[in-house]
Image (cartoon, rainbow, N blue to C red):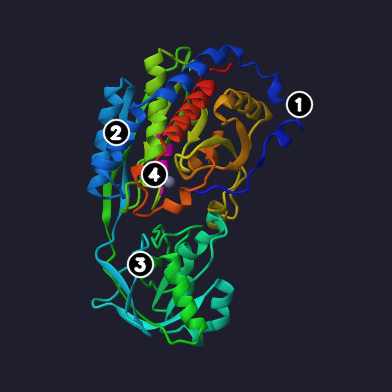
Protein backbone atom coordinates (compact mmCIF):
# COMPACT_ATOMS: atom_id res chain seq x y z
CA UNK A 1 0.00 0.00 0.00
CA UNK A 2 0.99 3.56 -0.35
CA UNK A 3 -0.76 6.82 0.31
CA UNK A 4 0.35 10.30 -0.42
CA UNK A 5 -0.55 13.94 -0.40
CA UNK A 6 -3.64 14.08 1.78
CA UNK A 7 -5.41 17.32 2.44
CA UNK A 8 -8.52 18.11 4.39
CA UNK A 9 -11.47 17.41 2.19
CA UNK A 10 -13.67 19.97 3.91
CA UNK A 11 -11.70 22.77 2.30
CA UNK A 12 -12.81 21.51 -1.06
CA UNK A 13 -16.37 20.38 -0.61
CA UNK A 14 -17.53 23.30 1.48
CA UNK A 15 -16.35 25.64 -1.25
CA UNK A 16 -19.04 24.04 -3.45
CA UNK A 17 -22.80 24.08 -3.12
CA UNK A 18 -23.21 20.89 -1.08
CA UNK A 19 -21.88 20.76 2.43
CA UNK A 20 -21.64 17.73 4.69
CA UNK A 21 -24.00 19.24 7.21
CA UNK A 22 -26.83 19.13 4.68
CA UNK A 23 -26.78 15.30 4.51
CA UNK A 24 -29.18 13.76 7.01
CA UNK A 25 -27.84 10.53 8.53
CA UNK A 26 -30.31 10.35 11.45
CA UNK A 27 -31.95 7.26 9.98
CA UNK A 28 -28.59 5.46 9.80
CA UNK A 29 -27.48 6.15 13.34
CA UNK A 30 -29.36 3.39 15.12
CA UNK A 31 -27.74 0.71 12.96
CA UNK A 32 -24.29 2.31 12.80
CA UNK A 33 -24.22 2.59 16.61
CA UNK A 34 -25.13 -1.09 16.82
CA UNK A 35 -22.38 -1.98 14.33
CA UNK A 36 -19.78 -0.02 16.31
CA UNK A 37 -20.91 -1.55 19.60
CA UNK A 38 -20.77 -5.11 18.29
CA UNK A 39 -17.45 -4.53 16.48
CA UNK A 40 -15.87 -3.31 19.72
CA UNK A 41 -16.90 -6.56 21.46
CA UNK A 42 -16.24 -8.86 18.52
CA UNK A 43 -13.87 -11.80 18.82
CA UNK A 44 -14.73 -13.61 15.57
CA UNK A 45 -12.67 -11.25 13.39
CA UNK A 46 -9.58 -11.67 15.55
CA UNK A 47 -10.02 -15.44 15.54
CA UNK A 48 -10.23 -15.47 11.73
CA UNK A 49 -7.16 -13.25 11.41
CA UNK A 50 -5.26 -15.47 13.84
CA UNK A 51 -6.19 -18.53 11.78
CA UNK A 52 -5.04 -16.88 8.56
CA UNK A 53 -1.73 -15.83 10.17
CA UNK A 54 -0.89 -18.83 12.33
CA UNK A 55 -2.42 -21.72 10.42
CA UNK A 56 -1.95 -20.59 6.82
CA UNK A 57 0.87 -18.04 7.13
CA UNK A 58 2.41 -16.02 4.32
CA UNK A 59 0.78 -16.08 0.90
CA UNK A 60 2.92 -14.97 -2.02
CA UNK A 61 1.35 -15.31 -5.47
CA UNK A 62 2.00 -18.76 -6.89
CA UNK A 63 2.62 -20.29 -3.45
CA UNK A 64 0.73 -23.09 -1.75
CA UNK A 65 -0.03 -20.65 1.06
CA UNK A 66 -2.05 -18.37 -1.22
CA UNK A 67 -4.05 -21.23 -2.70
CA UNK A 68 -4.80 -22.59 0.78
CA UNK A 69 -5.93 -19.10 1.76
CA UNK A 70 -8.17 -18.79 -1.33
CA UNK A 71 -9.94 -22.07 -0.50
CA UNK A 72 -10.25 -21.15 3.17
CA UNK A 73 -11.65 -17.69 2.34
CA UNK A 74 -14.25 -19.18 0.02
CA UNK A 75 -15.31 -21.70 2.69
CA UNK A 76 -15.48 -18.99 5.38
CA UNK A 77 -17.63 -16.71 3.24
CA UNK A 78 -20.04 -19.61 2.68
CA UNK A 79 -19.95 -20.58 6.34
CA UNK A 80 -21.01 -17.11 7.52
CA UNK A 81 -23.87 -17.11 5.02
CA UNK A 82 -22.75 -14.60 2.39
CA UNK A 83 -24.57 -14.82 -0.91
CA UNK A 84 -23.10 -15.38 -4.38
CA UNK A 85 -19.79 -16.61 -2.99
CA UNK A 86 -17.50 -17.17 -5.95
CA UNK A 87 -13.99 -16.97 -7.36
CA UNK A 88 -12.74 -14.76 -10.16
CA UNK A 89 -9.89 -16.79 -11.67
CA UNK A 90 -6.69 -15.10 -12.75
CA UNK A 91 -3.15 -16.07 -13.61
CA UNK A 92 -0.56 -14.66 -11.23
CA UNK A 93 3.24 -14.29 -11.45
CA UNK A 94 5.16 -16.98 -9.59
CA UNK A 95 8.45 -15.66 -8.24
CA UNK A 96 10.45 -17.98 -6.00
CA UNK A 97 13.14 -16.68 -3.64
CA UNK A 98 15.26 -19.81 -3.13
CA UNK A 99 18.36 -19.74 -0.94
CA UNK A 100 20.12 -16.44 -0.54
CA UNK A 101 22.84 -14.82 1.53
CA UNK A 102 25.15 -11.82 1.59
CA UNK A 103 28.47 -11.37 3.44
CA UNK A 104 30.98 -8.67 3.95
CA UNK A 105 34.29 -10.33 2.98
CA UNK A 106 36.62 -7.33 3.35
CA UNK A 107 37.71 -5.51 5.53
CA UNK A 108 36.14 -8.13 7.84
CA UNK A 109 34.14 -11.33 7.44
CA UNK A 110 30.55 -10.76 8.66
CA UNK A 111 27.05 -11.69 7.49
CA UNK A 112 24.77 -8.99 6.06
CA UNK A 113 21.04 -9.09 6.92
CA UNK A 114 19.36 -9.32 3.51
CA UNK A 115 16.16 -10.31 1.70
CA UNK A 116 16.07 -10.62 -2.08
CA UNK A 117 13.65 -8.23 -3.79
CA UNK A 118 10.59 -9.69 -5.47
CA UNK A 119 11.23 -10.04 -9.20
CA UNK A 120 15.01 -10.26 -8.87
CA UNK A 121 17.05 -12.72 -10.90
CA UNK A 122 19.58 -15.08 -9.33
CA UNK A 123 23.31 -14.52 -9.10
CA UNK A 124 25.45 -16.90 -11.16
CA UNK A 125 26.06 -20.19 -9.32
CA UNK A 126 28.66 -19.61 -6.63
CA UNK A 127 27.57 -15.99 -6.27
CA UNK A 128 29.17 -12.65 -6.99
CA UNK A 129 32.07 -11.15 -5.07
CA UNK A 130 32.80 -7.53 -5.89
CA UNK A 131 33.87 -4.17 -4.52
CA UNK A 132 31.12 -2.01 -3.16
CA UNK A 133 30.24 1.58 -3.92
CA UNK A 134 27.72 3.27 -1.61
CA UNK A 135 25.47 6.17 -2.66
CA UNK A 136 22.74 8.10 -0.84
CA UNK A 137 20.65 8.82 -3.93
CA UNK A 138 20.48 8.62 -7.72
CA UNK A 139 22.27 11.95 -8.17
CA UNK A 140 25.34 10.54 -6.39
CA UNK A 141 25.16 7.40 -8.52
CA UNK A 142 25.03 9.39 -11.75
CA UNK A 143 27.95 11.54 -10.62
CA UNK A 144 30.07 8.40 -10.19
CA UNK A 145 29.26 7.45 -13.77
CA UNK A 146 30.37 4.30 -15.55
CA UNK A 147 33.98 4.58 -14.41
CA UNK A 148 32.94 4.60 -10.76
CA UNK A 149 30.26 1.92 -10.96
CA UNK A 150 31.21 -0.68 -13.59
CA UNK A 151 31.95 -4.12 -12.14
CA UNK A 152 30.83 -3.08 -8.66
CA UNK A 153 27.98 -3.81 -6.30
CA UNK A 154 26.00 -0.60 -5.77
CA UNK A 155 24.58 -0.07 -2.27
CA UNK A 156 21.81 2.52 -1.96
CA UNK A 157 21.81 4.02 1.52
CA UNK A 158 18.80 6.29 1.02
CA UNK A 159 17.26 7.40 4.34
CA UNK A 160 13.49 6.98 4.68
CA UNK A 161 11.60 10.15 3.77
CA UNK A 162 8.18 8.68 2.97
CA UNK A 163 7.24 5.33 1.52
CA UNK A 164 6.14 6.94 -1.74
CA UNK A 165 9.41 8.83 -2.14
CA UNK A 166 11.93 6.31 -0.86
CA UNK A 167 10.51 3.19 -2.54
CA UNK A 168 11.98 4.34 -5.90
CA UNK A 169 15.38 2.92 -4.89
CA UNK A 170 13.82 -0.51 -4.29
CA UNK A 171 11.75 -0.31 -7.49
CA UNK A 172 14.29 0.92 -10.03
CA UNK A 173 17.66 0.99 -8.21
CA UNK A 174 18.89 -2.20 -9.87
CA UNK A 175 18.28 -1.02 -13.43
CA UNK A 176 19.73 2.45 -12.75
CA UNK A 177 22.91 0.81 -11.40
CA UNK A 178 23.05 -1.81 -14.18
CA UNK A 179 22.93 0.93 -16.80
CA UNK A 180 26.29 2.10 -15.46
CA UNK A 181 27.71 -1.44 -15.43
CA UNK A 182 27.03 -2.52 -11.82
CA UNK A 183 26.94 -6.29 -11.21
CA UNK A 184 24.36 -6.20 -8.35
CA UNK A 185 22.40 -3.70 -6.26
CA UNK A 186 21.72 -3.74 -2.52
CA UNK A 187 19.03 -1.38 -1.27
CA UNK A 188 18.60 -0.01 2.26
CA UNK A 189 15.21 -1.26 3.50
CA UNK A 190 12.34 1.18 3.04
CA UNK A 191 11.39 1.80 6.64
CA UNK A 192 11.57 4.59 9.21
CA UNK A 193 12.73 2.26 12.02
CA UNK A 194 14.74 -0.92 12.05
CA UNK A 195 15.69 -3.74 14.38
CA UNK A 196 18.07 -5.07 11.73
CA UNK A 197 15.26 -6.71 9.79
CA UNK A 198 15.41 -6.45 6.01
CA UNK A 199 12.20 -5.43 4.16
CA UNK A 200 11.47 -7.08 0.83
CA UNK A 201 9.09 -5.75 -1.84
CA UNK A 202 8.61 -5.53 -5.57
CA UNK A 203 11.26 -4.28 -7.97
CA UNK A 204 11.06 -3.86 -11.73
CA UNK A 205 13.73 -4.12 -14.42
CA UNK A 206 13.64 -1.55 -17.18
CA UNK A 207 14.25 -2.58 -20.78
CA UNK A 208 17.24 -0.25 -21.22
CA UNK A 209 19.60 -2.06 -18.84
CA UNK A 210 20.84 -5.61 -18.27
CA UNK A 211 19.15 -7.49 -15.41
CA UNK A 212 21.28 -7.75 -12.26
CA UNK A 213 20.43 -9.45 -8.95
CA UNK A 214 19.10 -7.14 -6.24
CA UNK A 215 18.24 -7.43 -2.56
CA UNK A 216 17.16 -5.34 0.39
CA UNK A 217 19.57 -5.07 3.30
CA UNK A 218 18.83 -3.94 6.85
CA UNK A 219 19.09 -0.19 7.51
CA UNK A 220 21.87 -0.86 10.01
CA UNK A 221 23.89 -2.79 7.44
CA UNK A 222 23.50 -0.12 4.74
CA UNK A 223 24.74 2.50 7.23
CA UNK A 224 27.59 0.22 8.29
CA UNK A 225 28.81 -0.32 4.72
CA UNK A 226 28.45 3.41 4.08
CA UNK A 227 30.45 4.20 7.21
CA UNK A 228 33.25 1.90 6.05
CA UNK A 229 33.49 3.42 2.56
CA UNK A 230 33.31 6.96 3.99
CA UNK A 231 36.29 6.08 6.17
CA UNK A 232 38.17 5.14 3.03
CA UNK A 233 37.96 1.37 3.51
CA UNK A 234 37.88 -0.89 0.47
CA UNK A 235 34.70 -2.89 0.99
CA UNK A 236 34.05 -6.22 -0.73
CA UNK A 237 30.79 -8.15 -0.53
CA UNK A 238 29.74 -11.65 -1.56
CA UNK A 239 26.13 -12.10 -2.74
CA UNK A 240 24.43 -15.37 -3.55
CA UNK A 241 20.79 -15.65 -4.71
CA UNK A 242 18.73 -18.40 -6.36
CA UNK A 243 15.67 -16.22 -7.08
CA UNK A 244 13.78 -17.01 -10.25
CA UNK A 245 10.45 -16.71 -12.03
CA UNK A 246 8.33 -19.86 -12.63
CA UNK A 247 5.51 -19.93 -15.21
CA UNK A 248 2.42 -17.95 -14.16
CA UNK A 249 0.23 -19.84 -11.67
CA UNK A 250 -3.54 -20.20 -11.34
CA UNK A 251 -5.17 -18.20 -8.59
CA UNK A 252 -8.42 -16.32 -7.95
CA UNK A 253 -10.05 -13.39 -6.19
CA UNK A 254 -12.73 -14.54 -3.73
CA UNK A 255 -15.96 -12.63 -3.14
CA UNK A 256 -19.30 -12.81 -1.37
CA UNK A 257 -22.22 -10.45 -0.80
CA UNK A 258 -25.10 -9.24 1.26
CA UNK A 259 -27.65 -8.51 -1.46
CA UNK A 260 -29.34 -5.12 -1.27
CA UNK A 261 -32.97 -5.06 -0.18
CA UNK A 262 -34.09 -2.35 -2.64
CA UNK A 263 -31.29 -1.82 -5.14
CA UNK A 264 -29.53 -5.20 -5.34
CA UNK A 265 -27.83 -4.33 -8.63
CA UNK A 266 -26.07 -1.33 -7.13
CA UNK A 267 -22.86 -2.41 -5.44
CA UNK A 268 -20.61 -1.05 -2.74
CA UNK A 269 -17.47 -3.19 -3.09
CA UNK A 270 -15.09 -3.48 -0.17
CA UNK A 271 -11.96 -5.50 0.58
CA UNK A 272 -8.21 -5.83 0.66
CA UNK A 273 -5.60 -8.18 -0.75
CA UNK A 274 -5.24 -11.79 0.32
CA UNK A 275 -1.70 -12.28 -0.98
CA UNK A 276 1.36 -11.21 0.99
CA UNK A 277 5.13 -11.42 0.67
CA UNK A 278 6.80 -14.76 1.38
CA UNK A 279 8.02 -13.69 4.82
CA UNK A 280 6.18 -13.12 8.11
CA UNK A 281 2.44 -13.80 8.14
CA UNK A 282 1.01 -10.86 6.20
CA UNK A 283 -0.85 -9.81 9.35
CA UNK A 284 -0.99 -6.04 8.80
CA UNK A 285 -0.33 -6.35 5.05
CA UNK A 286 -3.01 -7.23 4.36
CA UNK A 287 -4.58 -9.99 6.43
CA UNK A 288 -6.11 -7.34 8.68
CA UNK A 289 -7.69 -5.63 5.67
CA UNK A 290 -9.42 -8.66 4.18
CA UNK A 291 -10.61 -9.97 7.52
CA UNK A 292 -11.90 -6.55 8.67
CA UNK A 293 -13.94 -6.27 5.46
CA UNK A 294 -15.35 -9.78 5.88
CA UNK A 295 -16.11 -9.24 9.55
CA UNK A 296 -18.00 -6.03 8.76
CA UNK A 297 -20.44 -8.15 6.75
CA UNK A 298 -20.53 -10.87 9.41
CA UNK A 299 -21.66 -8.27 11.97
CA UNK A 300 -24.38 -6.97 9.64
CA UNK A 301 -25.65 -10.53 9.22
CA UNK A 302 -25.59 -11.14 12.98
CA UNK A 303 -27.51 -7.90 13.59
CA UNK A 304 -29.99 -8.63 10.81
CA UNK A 305 -28.99 -5.50 8.88
CA UNK A 306 -29.70 -5.62 5.15
CA UNK A 307 -28.80 -2.36 3.41
CA UNK A 308 -30.59 -0.83 0.43
CA UNK A 309 -27.71 -1.60 -1.97
CA UNK A 310 -25.57 -4.75 -2.22
CA UNK A 311 -22.33 -4.82 -0.23
CA UNK A 312 -19.75 -7.13 -1.79
CA UNK A 313 -16.57 -8.15 -0.02
CA UNK A 314 -13.64 -9.05 -2.28
CA UNK A 315 -10.31 -10.61 -1.35
CA UNK A 316 -8.08 -9.57 -4.25
CA UNK A 317 -4.92 -11.54 -5.10
CA UNK A 318 -1.48 -10.51 -6.35
CA UNK A 319 -1.47 -6.91 -5.10
CA UNK A 320 2.15 -7.23 -4.02
CA UNK A 321 3.83 -8.19 -7.27
CA UNK A 322 1.53 -7.71 -10.21
CA UNK A 323 -1.93 -6.35 -9.43
CA UNK A 324 -3.55 -9.13 -11.46
CA UNK A 325 -6.40 -9.62 -8.97
CA UNK A 326 -7.55 -6.01 -9.18
CA UNK A 327 -7.41 -6.15 -12.97
CA UNK A 328 -9.26 -9.50 -13.10
CA UNK A 329 -12.06 -8.11 -10.94
CA UNK A 330 -12.34 -5.04 -13.18
CA UNK A 331 -12.63 -7.30 -16.26
CA UNK A 332 -15.17 -9.52 -14.51
CA UNK A 333 -17.35 -6.48 -13.67
CA UNK A 334 -17.29 -5.42 -17.32
CA UNK A 335 -20.25 -3.30 -18.40
CA UNK A 336 -21.72 -3.42 -14.90
CA UNK A 337 -19.13 -0.90 -13.74
CA UNK A 338 -21.77 1.84 -13.88
CA UNK A 339 -23.59 0.05 -11.05
CA UNK A 340 -20.57 0.27 -8.76
CA UNK A 341 -21.59 2.96 -6.31
CA UNK A 342 -18.31 3.00 -4.37
CA UNK A 343 -15.15 0.94 -3.77
CA UNK A 344 -13.48 0.74 -0.35
CA UNK A 345 -10.09 -0.79 0.35
CA UNK A 346 -8.20 -1.30 3.58
CA UNK A 347 -4.49 -1.79 2.92
CA UNK A 348 -2.60 0.45 5.30
CA UNK A 349 -2.35 -1.93 8.23
CA UNK A 350 -4.79 -2.62 11.05
CA UNK A 351 -3.66 0.19 13.32
CA UNK A 352 -6.06 2.67 14.96
CA UNK A 353 -8.21 4.17 12.20
CA UNK A 354 -8.55 7.93 11.80
CA UNK A 355 -11.10 7.91 8.97
CA UNK A 356 -11.07 7.50 5.22
CA UNK A 357 -9.18 8.94 2.29
CA UNK A 358 -11.34 9.72 -0.69
CA UNK A 359 -9.47 8.96 -3.92
CA UNK A 360 -9.03 12.38 -5.47
CA UNK A 361 -5.38 12.47 -6.46
CA UNK A 362 -3.10 10.23 -8.52
CA UNK A 363 -0.81 8.19 -6.21
CA UNK A 364 2.92 8.75 -6.75
CA UNK A 365 3.57 5.17 -7.91
CA UNK A 366 0.84 5.47 -10.53
CA UNK A 367 2.08 8.84 -11.71
CA UNK A 368 5.56 7.34 -12.09
CA UNK A 369 4.30 4.49 -14.30
CA UNK A 370 1.67 6.48 -16.14
CA UNK A 371 2.39 10.21 -16.34
CA UNK A 372 -0.90 10.79 -18.19
CA UNK A 373 -3.10 9.21 -15.47
CA UNK A 374 -6.27 11.25 -14.99
CA UNK A 375 -7.05 12.68 -11.56
CA UNK A 376 -10.11 10.90 -10.11
CA UNK A 377 -13.14 13.15 -9.94
CA UNK A 378 -15.46 13.00 -6.95
CA UNK A 379 -18.73 14.91 -6.94
CA UNK A 380 -19.24 17.32 -4.02
CA UNK A 381 -22.45 15.45 -3.29
CA UNK A 382 -20.68 12.10 -2.91
CA UNK A 383 -17.94 13.71 -0.83
CA UNK A 384 -20.61 15.25 1.38
CA UNK A 385 -22.23 11.85 1.88
CA UNK A 386 -18.89 10.30 2.82
CA UNK A 387 -18.19 13.07 5.28
CA UNK A 388 -21.62 12.73 6.88
CA UNK A 389 -21.21 8.95 7.22
CA UNK A 390 -17.71 9.51 8.55
CA UNK A 391 -19.16 11.72 11.30
CA UNK A 392 -21.01 8.64 12.59
CA UNK A 393 -17.55 7.24 13.49
CA UNK A 394 -16.71 10.12 15.82
CA UNK A 395 -17.17 7.98 18.95
CA UNK A 396 -14.18 5.83 17.90
CA UNK A 397 -12.17 8.77 16.53
CA UNK A 398 -12.40 7.66 12.91
CA UNK A 399 -14.38 10.56 11.45
CA UNK A 400 -11.67 12.31 9.40
CA UNK A 401 -12.25 12.42 5.64
CA UNK A 402 -9.32 13.54 3.52
CA UNK A 403 -8.17 13.47 -0.07
CA UNK A 404 -5.77 10.68 -0.99
CA UNK A 405 -4.80 8.23 -3.70
CA UNK A 406 -6.70 4.97 -4.30
CA UNK A 407 -5.20 1.74 -2.98
CA UNK A 408 -3.84 -0.51 -5.71
CA UNK A 409 -6.60 -3.14 -6.00
CA UNK A 410 -9.38 -0.61 -6.51
CA UNK A 411 -7.32 1.60 -8.83
CA UNK A 412 -8.77 -0.04 -11.97
CA UNK A 413 -12.27 0.73 -10.64
CA UNK A 414 -11.37 4.30 -9.71
CA UNK A 415 -9.80 4.79 -13.15
CA UNK A 416 -13.19 3.76 -14.59
CA UNK A 417 -14.97 6.43 -12.56
CA UNK A 418 -16.01 4.56 -9.39
CA UNK A 419 -15.51 6.71 -6.27
CA UNK A 420 -12.77 5.09 -4.17
CA UNK A 421 -12.09 5.17 -0.45
CA UNK A 422 -9.22 3.87 1.65
CA UNK A 423 -9.15 3.38 5.39
CA UNK A 424 -6.68 5.85 6.92
CA UNK A 425 -4.91 4.82 10.14
CA UNK A 426 -2.45 6.52 12.48
CA UNK A 427 0.32 4.72 10.59
CA UNK A 428 2.63 4.64 13.60
CA UNK A 429 4.19 1.22 13.10
CA UNK A 430 2.93 -0.12 9.77
CA UNK A 431 6.19 0.51 7.93
CA UNK A 432 8.21 -0.98 10.79
CA UNK A 433 6.72 -4.41 10.01
CA UNK A 434 5.90 -3.96 6.32
CA UNK A 435 7.21 -6.82 4.10
CA UNK A 436 9.31 -8.37 6.89
CA UNK A 437 9.39 -11.52 8.97
CA UNK A 438 7.95 -9.38 11.78
CA UNK A 439 4.54 -8.75 10.13
CA UNK A 440 2.91 -11.30 12.41
CA UNK A 441 -0.35 -11.66 14.32
CA UNK A 442 1.15 -10.56 17.67
CA UNK A 443 1.56 -7.06 16.15
CA UNK A 444 -2.22 -6.71 15.81
CA UNK A 445 -3.65 -4.64 18.68
CA UNK A 446 -7.13 -6.09 19.28
CA UNK A 447 -8.80 -2.75 20.11
CA UNK A 448 -7.34 -1.08 17.01
CA UNK A 449 -8.38 -3.96 14.77
CA UNK A 450 -11.92 -3.85 16.20
CA UNK A 451 -12.07 -0.14 15.37
CA UNK A 452 -11.02 -0.94 11.80
CA UNK A 453 -13.88 -3.43 11.56
CA UNK A 454 -16.28 -0.80 12.92
CA UNK A 455 -15.07 1.82 10.44
CA UNK A 456 -15.37 -0.55 7.47
CA UNK A 457 -18.82 -1.65 8.60
CA UNK A 458 -20.16 1.87 9.12
CA UNK A 459 -18.76 3.33 5.90
CA UNK A 460 -19.92 0.45 3.70
CA UNK A 461 -23.33 0.29 5.34
CA UNK A 462 -23.77 4.08 5.17
CA UNK A 463 -22.90 4.21 1.47
CA UNK A 464 -25.11 1.21 0.71
CA UNK A 465 -28.04 2.68 2.68
CA UNK A 466 -28.00 6.41 2.00
CA UNK A 467 -30.56 7.67 -0.48
ZN1 LIG B 1 -0.70 -4.31 1.07
The residue that appears at 63% across and 48% down in the rendered structure is 5
Q: Nearer the viewer, residue 301 or 44?
A: 44
Q: CA distance from mark 4 to mark 2?
A: 22 Å
- N-terminal of the two: label 4 or label 1? 1
Cα gap from disc 1 to disc 3, whole angstroms: 56 Å
Under tag 2, what secondary structure? Answer: helix
Q: Give the CA distance from mark 4 to mark 1.
A: 44 Å
User: Which label sits on residue 443?
Assistant: 4
Residue 23 position (above or below residue 246): above
The residue depicted at 28 percent of the width and 64 percent of the height is 244
Choose top left, top right, bottom left or bottom right for residue 106: bottom left
Give neighbour class at mark 2: few <14, some 14-19, many 20+ (Cα, 10 Å).
Answer: many
- Residue identifier under label 2: 73
Report if the beta carbon of the residue with label 4 is closer than 8 angstroms to ligand 1: no
Can I make out residue 421 in this image? Answer: no
Q: Could you say where residue 188 lies in the image, as x and y percent from the top left?
A: 46, 66
Q: Quadrant of the C terminus?
A: top right
Residue 57 image position (x, y, % from top left)? 27, 45
Circle 1 residue:
17
Label 3 SS? loop
Q: Secondary structure at mark 4?
A: helix
Q: Which type of secondary structure does the marked residue at label 1 adopt?
A: loop
Which span is picked out in magenta? 323-335
Q: Nearer the viewer, mark 4 or mark 3?
A: 4
Q: Given contact means CB atoms under 8 Å apart, are the residues at marks 3 and 2 in contact?
A: no
Amino acid sequence: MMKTGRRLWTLVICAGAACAQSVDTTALKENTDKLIESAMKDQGGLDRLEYLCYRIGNRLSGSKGLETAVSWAEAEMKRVGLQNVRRVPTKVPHWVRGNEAARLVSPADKPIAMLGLGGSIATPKGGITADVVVVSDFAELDKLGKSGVAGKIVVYDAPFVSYGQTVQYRGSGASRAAKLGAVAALVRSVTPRSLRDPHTGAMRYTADAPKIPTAAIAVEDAMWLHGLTRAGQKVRVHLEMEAHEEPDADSADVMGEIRGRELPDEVVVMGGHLDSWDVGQGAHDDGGGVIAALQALVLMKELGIQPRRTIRVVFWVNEENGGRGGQAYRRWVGEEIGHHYAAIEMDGGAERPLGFDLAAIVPERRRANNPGAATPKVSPRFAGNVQAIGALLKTIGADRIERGGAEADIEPLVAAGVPGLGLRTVGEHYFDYHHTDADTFDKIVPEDFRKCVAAMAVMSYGLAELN
